[in-house]
Structures are given as C-alpha cells and as structure tokens.
C-alpha cells in the first residue's frame, strides 16, 4: 500500500506575482523610454537623472494608488454581492436551488444526486452563501489587507524597475556611454524579468523574455526617434 502523501505544487501567490509583474513591467519600460527620449534631445546626464527620478516618484505613487483602488473596489464588490446572495438565500430559496441545480447539472450530476446537496446547504445558510459566491459568481473572498499590500508591492516594484535604466546615468558622466549602457542593462533586465515571469505564470519563459524585451525596446526606440526628430 502506497503511504506517500500527494503534495500539490500549484503556485499560491498569484495576486502578489501579478502586482510585481505590473510594477516591474511598467517600472522598467516607462523610465527606460523616458531616458531614451531625453537622450535623443539633450546631452546632459543630470537632466536625464532629474527627470527620471521625478517620473519614478510620480509613477510609483500613481501605480501604487491604482493598485490600492482596484483591490479596494474588488473587496467592496465582493461584500455587495455577498449581501445580495444572503438576501436571496432567505427570500428566494426556489430560485437559488434552481441555480445550484444548473451548476451541478453542468458537471453531470443527476437530480437524485443534487437534491441532498441542496438540502445540506439549506441547513447551513453561511455555507450556502459561500457556495453561491464561489460557484455561481466565481468570486473568492479577498484578503482584507490586500489593498495596502497591493499598493506597496506595485509601488516598490516600480521603483526597483525604474532605477535600472536610470542607474548608468547616475554613475556615468559621459552621456553617450550612459545611454548605451542603459540600453544594454535594461534590455538584459527585461529579458531576465520576462523569463522569470514566464516561469511563474506557466507560459513559455523564452517567449515571455522575448516579448517583454521587445515591448520595452520598441517603446524606447520610438521615444528616442521622436525626440531626435523634433529636437
């Protein structure tokens, strides 16, 4: 008899990974494009650094606040829907039972198999509501700390990502060398970030690396070309 336990390997922190992806992706791409655009129009690293730091500060706050509001809206939506389901369980039991039948019929269960399940849920209204939230509406109860955690994660990820393309301009005084090094370092960082993102999200890591680097490279190239054209 096999006594070995089966261990699930599913990744559990998809929300945190999503926040890091959002913050890092924009943090690497937007300041990189800004620095490239300024490099096409000006010839002083201090200007690129000043504008880049201002953009990183503003961008991290805006992105973090956006993440906070999105997570809070998600929590408010869940609470609103849960109140509505709780009311319907009490005041519209026939309609709720019909919805449960529809859910289980989709999985191939018969009426004889569904009836005792409905009876069991009706004896426990809280479980009834939780069941309807998950299987009818597809909603999971959000972490009450999710909004603040999302804001902090996105904001910090944006700052970390934004400092990478800006670092060469901080440490090098020669404008052309700083621009060239920024391109190399940032494209490499985008490739690494895309590869890691692909591993975590289950997509092809090499394709993810190529796509991420391509998006950042195209954004920077367009910004640089436009700045050159109008300077």
Image (spheres, rainbow, N blue to C red):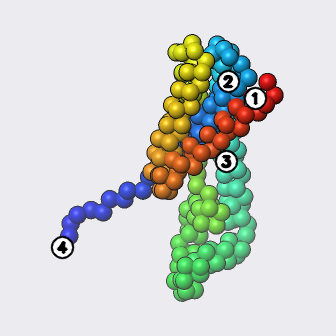
161 vs 5, nearest the viewer: 161
Question: Residue drawn 68% across and 42% down?
Answer: 70
56 vs 210, nearest the viewer: 210
Which circle, 2 or 4, is nearer the viewer?
Answer: 2
Which label was assigned to residue 39?
2
162 in relation to 187, above or below: above
Q: Secondary structure at mark 3?
A: helix
Question: Residue drawn 54% across and 37% down?
Answer: 187
Can the viewer see residue 52?
yes
Task: Determine contact: label 3, label 2, CB under 8 Å.
Answer: no
Q: CA distance from mark 1 to mark 4?
A: 71 Å
Residue 156, percent from left and from top: 56, 29
Mark 1, residue position:
227
Q: CA distance from mark 3 to mark 1?
A: 40 Å
61 in relation to 130, above or below: above
200 vs 46, nearest the viewer: 46
Q: CA distance from mark 2 to mark 1?
A: 8 Å
Which of marks 3 and 4 precedes in the sequence? 4
Mark 3, residue position:
74
Residue 116, percent from left and from top: 53, 79
Q: CA distance from mark 4 to mark 3?
A: 46 Å
Which of marks 4 and 2 precedes in the sequence? 4
Which of marks 2 and 3 precedes in the sequence? 2
Q: CA distance from mark 3 to mark 2?
A: 41 Å
Which circle, 1 or 4, is nearer the viewer?
Answer: 1
- Please tell me how crowded label 2 is: few (under 14), some (14-19), or many (20+) other residues with Cα within 10 Å: many
Which of marks 4 and 1 precedes in the sequence? 4
- Image quadrant where one finds the N terminus: bottom left
Task: Determine contact: label 2, label 4, CB under 8 Å.
Answer: no
Which of marks 1 and 2 precedes in the sequence? 2
Q: Secondary structure at mark 4?
A: loop
């Amino acid at each position: 008899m096999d006594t070995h336990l089966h261990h699930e390997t599913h990744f559990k922190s998809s929300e945190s990974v999503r926040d890091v992806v959002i913050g890092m992706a924009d943090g690497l791409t937007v300041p990189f494009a800004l620095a490239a655009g300024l490099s096409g129009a000006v010839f002083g690293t201090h200007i690129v650094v000043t504008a880049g730091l201002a953009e990183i500060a503003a961008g991290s706050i805006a992105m973090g606040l956006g993440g906070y509001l999105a997570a809070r809206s998600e929590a408010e939506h869940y609470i609103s829907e849960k109140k509505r389901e709780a009311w319907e369980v009490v005041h519209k039991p026939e309609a709720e039972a019909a919805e449960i039948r529809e859910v289980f019929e989709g999985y191939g269960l018969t009426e004889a198999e569904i009836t005792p399940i409905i009876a069991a849920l009706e004896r426990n209204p809280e479980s009834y509501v939780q069941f309807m939230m998950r299987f009818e509406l597809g909603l999971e109860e959000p972490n009450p700390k999710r909004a603040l955690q999302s804001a902090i994660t996105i904001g910090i990820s944006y700052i970390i990502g934004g400092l990478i393309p800006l670092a060469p301009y901080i440490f090098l005084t020669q404008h052309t060398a700083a621009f060239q090094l920024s391109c190399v370092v940032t494209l490499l960082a985008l490739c690494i970030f895309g590869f890691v993102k692909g591993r975590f999200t289950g997509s092809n890591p090499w394709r993810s690396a190529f796509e991420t680097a391509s998006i950042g490279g195209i954004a920077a190239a367009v910004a640089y070309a436009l700045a050159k054209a109008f300077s």
